Image (cartoon, rainbow, N blue to C red):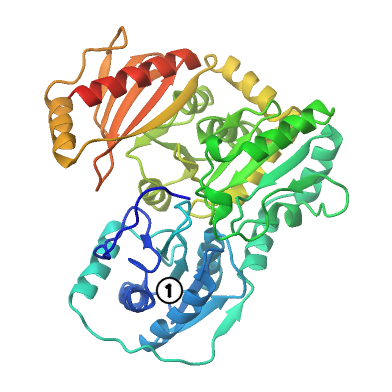
Amino acid sequence: MSSAPLPLHPAPIRFGTDGWRGVLGVDITVERLLRVAAAAAQELAHRAPDDLDSRTVVIGYDRRFLAPELAEAITAAVRGSELEPLLTETPVPTPACSWAVVERRALGALVITASHNPSEWLGLKIKGPFGGSVEGDFTAAVERRLAAAGITPPIQGTINRFDGRQDHLEGLRQKLDLTALADGLRSMNLKVIVDPMHGSAAGCVSELLNSSADGLVEEIRSERDPLFGGHPPEPLAPYLTQLITAVQASHAAGTPAVGLVFDGDGDRIAAVDETGRFCSTQLLMPLLIDHLARARQLPGTVVKTVSGSDLMRLVAEGLGREVLELPVGFKYIAAEMLSGEVLIGGEESGGVGFGMHLPERDALFAAMLVLEALVEGGKPLGARLGDLQQRHGGASHYDRLDLRLADMEARRRLETLLADTPPEEVAGSPVQSVISTDGIKLRLGPSHWLMLRFSGTEPLLRLYCEAPDAARVNAVLSWARRFAEAA
């Protein structure tokens, strides 16, 4: 669990990059959730497309403490807004709600979740009628409704429910040849070990691959635990000791394995290769680009955030695909998916979306495509990535460091310094170019860069680095830490 002290007073209701989140019982209370849900539902109705004849708002929830009860509570707020709530029967991955919105032509969805945040957090995500997260102008309008302090009394009534989990899985089955995929994994003798981090994607891979009896899929940490085993349900290497150990043990016993990990609400993915190496989307995205563009020959542009690995661009351009580089945040990728033909869009933090699916991160769909790419290539993940890196410019290494600054004044000083006089040299390497798409990105060479990006609301500096080897990554991040602290 988080060791940071809990706030004593609730923070103002403000939406972040994907929803409103806060500490349960302090920021997130029944009274506040009812108000926010009513305002969000009213805004969904107000902005409904002219050709959408619906009064339905899908409501879903994850496995966090009180999430089912609070999801049931906000049905009354939706009903009080003269709309029709439709509640999932069980905890679901957030993308299942987006899928339900599109399939049922609903106004949108409200999802009770705090995604990958620590266990004491909860929140609300809003999905639009297109099946993805609403943009900043929408949430700003919700905040204005809340500031107007209008009262929308909740109305109790019979709650209509549906099996959102199975609907989502059936939708994925329609898009994938899962029988051939399972047969291919068995022929490779490749075991799949899944870590849903106690979240709402638990059991889904086993069901999709119909592997209850033959040992093809093993799941760990699949039971509900609102404390998430003592760590945030975020797919990062420090929280995946059990998965890494299981993959290494399988490999040592003669059966290569691939580890798949999902965050608490099933919209972020990472993996562990057969050697136990953690593989973020910095490595999975290039694999998926290669598979979809070369093997599947699907159309579309590749969209990456500025913090994404150069390997994404190298693979895409090697296959003749245009690459768009956007600021950090999946909302920018989703907007591109709604306006043009996109093959794949992804960010370094684990969110991947596909033009043939939804303008939304869907970790289960991404996981099935990763397995499909391994079967197509006939090699386990580490070997497959090694081939890909050798073919498109050699190996690269990546890491990220979050550095908490002394206060907001220290942040302002550093922001001014970077904007006015960015470094000309980093850890002995001259800066070749400065990119300011989001924060400051200092290019040091081929597949070698340092990026400094500030949090939107905190004195927090995020340091990203890609370099030809792990030692160089560590050296550059250490230099960046000293530079920031001395500013």
Residue at 54%, 77% in the rendered image: 87
Q: Examine the rendered structure and indicate whether residue 267 appears above or below residue 100.
A: above
Q: Which residue is mark 1?
A: 107
Q: Nearer the viewer, residue 73 or 422?
A: 73
Q: Position of residue 215 (x, y in %)?
A: 84, 46
In the image: residue 466, left or right of residue 174? left
Residue at 52%, 14% in the rendered image: 393
Q: Examine the rendered structure and indicate whether residue 377 appears above or below residue 84.
A: above
Q: Position of residue 305 (x, y in %)?
A: 38, 36
Q: Residue 155 sits in which quadrant?
A: bottom left
Which quadrant of the rendered structure holds the C terminus?
top left
Q: Nearer the viewer, residue 459 or 468?
A: 459
Asked whether residue 447 appears in the rendered view, the answer is: no
Q: Examine the rendered structure and indicate whether residue 16 appears above or below residue 402.
A: below
Asked whether residue 175 appears in the rendered view, the answer is: yes
Residue at 77%, 51% in the rendered image: 209
Kind of residue indicated by mark 1: Leu
Q: Nearer the viewer, residue 13 or 359?
A: 13
Q: Nearer the viewer, residue 173 or 417?
A: 417
- For disc 1, the neighbor class at 10 Å (few under 14, some 14 to 19, many from 20) is many
In the image: residue 357, left or right of residue 272? left
Q: Examine the rendered structure and indicate whether residue 263 appears above or below residue 187.
A: below
In the image: residue 77, left or right of residue 318? left
Q: Position of residue 170 (x, y in %)?
A: 68, 62
In the image: residue 279, left or right of residue 416? right
Q: Residue 162 sits in which quadrant?
A: bottom right
Q: Position of residue 458 (x, y in %)?
A: 25, 45
Judging from the image, what secondary structure is the residue with disc 1 in? loop
